[in-house]
Amino acid sequence: MELSLREAATRLHRSERTLRDQLIRGIIRGTKINGRWTVREADLPVDEAGRQAQRARADAVRATVEKAISRRLPPMTIEDVELFRLGRDLLRRLPAEHAAAIGEAIDSVVSPAGGRWCPG
């Protein structure tokens, strides 16, 4: 999102004059269009509170991914894989309302922790 000089200065808690000087010196990236400065929101420097928020979001994503990765499926045999493929193919041939009902039943057995089973 493009911000005017005034909007960017307000977000950074700086005067327009200070921000204009920083744009001219290249401290902050911006573009001059028809004599007016614009700054992309993504180019604004991040303050300490913003860095902490970014770290918190990154930590939450990391924890979610690690939790998902840590759930290991039991080893499967060739027979298990073949049965899965056969069941999947049969489910695809069923009318949608029947496949959904069977999928819900499978969810309650295979994934009681709240995951979703998807026939596709």
Image (cartoon, rainbow, N blue to C red):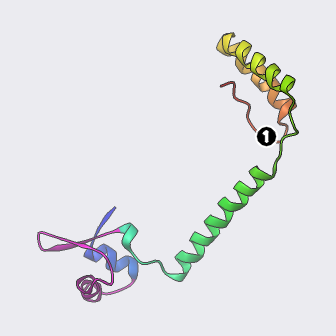
Q: Magenta segment, which residues?
A: 13-40
Question: What residue lies at 27% left-to-right and 76% top-to-bottom?
Answer: 6
Question: What residue lies at 83% left-to-right and 46% top-to-bottom?
Answer: 72
Front-lying residue, 54 or 73: 73
Q: Mark 1 points at which residue?
A: 114
Front-lying residue, 4 or 80: 80
The number of callouts visible is 1
Outermost front residue: 78
Determine whether, in the image, residue 96 is placed left or right of residue 108: left
Front-lying residue, 90 or 4: 90
- Is 36 a magenta residue? yes
- Indicate whether 17 appears above or below 78: below
Determine whether, in the image, residue 60 is placed left or right of residue 14: right
x, y percent for residue 105: 82, 24
**Snapshot quadrant of residue 66:** bottom right
- Indicate whether 2 appears above or below 29: above
Q: What element carries label 1?
A: loop
- Residue type at the position of mark 1: Gly
Mark 1, Cα crowd under 10 Å, few <14 / some 14-19 / many 20+, is: few
x, y percent for residue 80: 85, 25
- Is 30 a magenta residue? yes
Question: What residue lies at 75% left-to-right and 24% top-to-bottom?
Answer: 103
x, y percent for residue 116: 73, 35
Question: What residue lies at 79% left-to-right and 40% top-to-bottom?
Answer: 114
- Indicate whether 44 appears above or below 120: below
